[in-house]
Amino acid sequence: MSSCLTFLHAADIHLGRPFSGLAKCRPELAKLVQDAGYKAWERIVTTALGRRVDFVTIAGDLFDSSNPTVRARVAFREGVLKLHRAGIPVFLALGNHDPLTSFPDSLKSLPGLHIFGPEQIGVRPRLPERDSNVVIYGASFETHVLTENLVRQFRRDPDAKVAVGVVHCNVSGVGGHLDYAPCTLDDLRSAGMDVWCLGHVHSPLTLCEDPLIIYSGASQGAHINETGPRGCDLVTVDESGAASTLFVPLAPIIWSEVSVDVSHARGIEETVDLAEATFLDRGPWPDGTQAVVARIRLDGTDSSGKLGALVEGEEFSEILAERLSLLPVPVVLESVRDERRLPTDGSSLLEEGGFLADFLNVCAAVRGDAFQLEGIMDDIRTELLKRVGSLHLAPELDPRRLKGDRSATQALLKEAEEQIVRICLRLGGI
Ligand SMILES: [Mn+2]
């Protein structure tokens, strides 16, 4: 028996997430990711059992909704009971998606499950194999919106040998998440815990090593902005109270966004090969990865312009999807984005002559002439105001704002120029 205390920390499991947007356009993909969410929860349970941890902590957004689905409720209950039968208790703090007031009563009294209330409370689990005085502190969201600092009320008891805090909160506005239960790193440090197990931020993050302050991240990524492996944390606390963590990837589906440089592709066939090679290079994926859902960005300069519109056609995506689905870890295409830079800096299009060469020459002349540039911006402004009115003009398109900012105006013109060239090449025959 190891003398270290070990436990599993997970958060933002979001059981029962509907993926309604995705279900409308890609029902098969929505189903794949939804099933993966349940699978990730099952893996949390089997990992806890396999590692024979002392307990499991969950820091909120266990359920996606305050009215969890039947499948979500059944899956959660099953997992908790399995852990209970193995003598592994679960400590659950609730978050903004699954607040206490709406949490199903039938689940509140599950054996082996402790749900934290709205005020800080320290629970001393009975851990038969430990004589140490382990205290787990936590607090739950009572309602969806919580703007108070939950963490400031936390204090370690003087007799606690190991102190663990569990809470769903936003530390110093960490990127891109609603500012619920805001707190600072200093608030967390001054509570005197050995470990802080947090939820809310969906990327795995270690905010501090001593004391250990971690976001486990979501157990399964839900969309293209949640790329990379997802899972939970295996936390170890030694006798001196020093804590460390090991990230355990569990998500069956990994979201991925890759750029494929098509500059040297000699044709559409090689573009397919390049995309395939990019994914082979990216591996190996963590064990248990069932599929990678990928967005492919085609970039680089299409110097000959020969790939033209072929990469935008449905057939290209279909062939690519078919090829990628045969990789050792199958890749499911989320989308293909065409972000090729076109050779509008001159080179081949200018050499070819014709309409596009004339157009590019005019653009270059205008860009270099402040007077002409301003004249064009005035025309655009008049036209835009006629069409949409000043109230609806997006700030970045407002020529009044651009006036006097020559480089921004030039960049805008360059972008327009590239779009026009792209459209012309797509039409072909020019
Ligand atoms: Mn969440």
Image (cartoon, grey):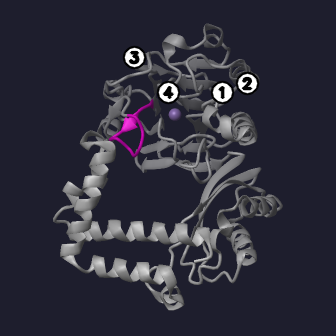
- Which numbered mark, 4 or 2, is in the foreground of this view? 2
Towards the viewer: 364 or 48: 364
- Measured in 3D between alpha carbons, the distance from the residue under mark 1 to the one under mark 4, in whole angstroms, is 27 Å
For numbered disc 1, what is the local secondary structure? loop
Left or right for 155, reference 309: left
Marks 2 and 1, the one that precedes in the sequence:
1
For numbered disc 4, what is the local secondary structure? strand
Instruction: Reply above or below: 89 against 276.
Output: above
- The residue identified by callout 4 is 136
- Measured in 3D between alpha carbons, the distance from the residue under mark 4 to the one under mark 2, in whole angstroms, is 25 Å
* Res 16 label: 1
| Image quadrant occupied by the C terminus | bottom right
Residue at 81 percent across and 60 percent down: it is 322
Instruction: Reply above or below: 64 against 208.
Output: above
Marks 3 and 1, the one that precedes in the sequence:
1
Dots 3 and 1: beta carbons under 8 Å? no
- Which numbered mark, 3 or 1, is in the foreground of this view? 1
- Measured in 3D between alpha carbons, the distance from the residue under mark 3 to the one under mark 4, in whole angstroms, is 13 Å
- Which numbered mark, 2 or 1, is in the foreground of this view? 1
For numbered disc 2, what is the local secondary structure? helix
Q: Label 2 is placed on what type of residue? A: Ala
* Res 75 label: 2
Q: Which residues are magenta?
A: 168-178
Marks 1 and 4, the one that precedes in the sequence:
1
* Residue 413, horizontal then vertical, whole percent: 34, 68
| Image quadrant occupied by the N terminus | top right
Q: Label 4 is placed on what type of residue? A: Ile
Within 10 Å of disc 1 (Cα), the crowding (few <14, some 14-19, many 20+) is many
Q: Label 3 is placed on what type of residue? A: Glu
**In the picture, residue 284 is in which quadrant?**
bottom right
Towards the viewer: 395 or 117: 395
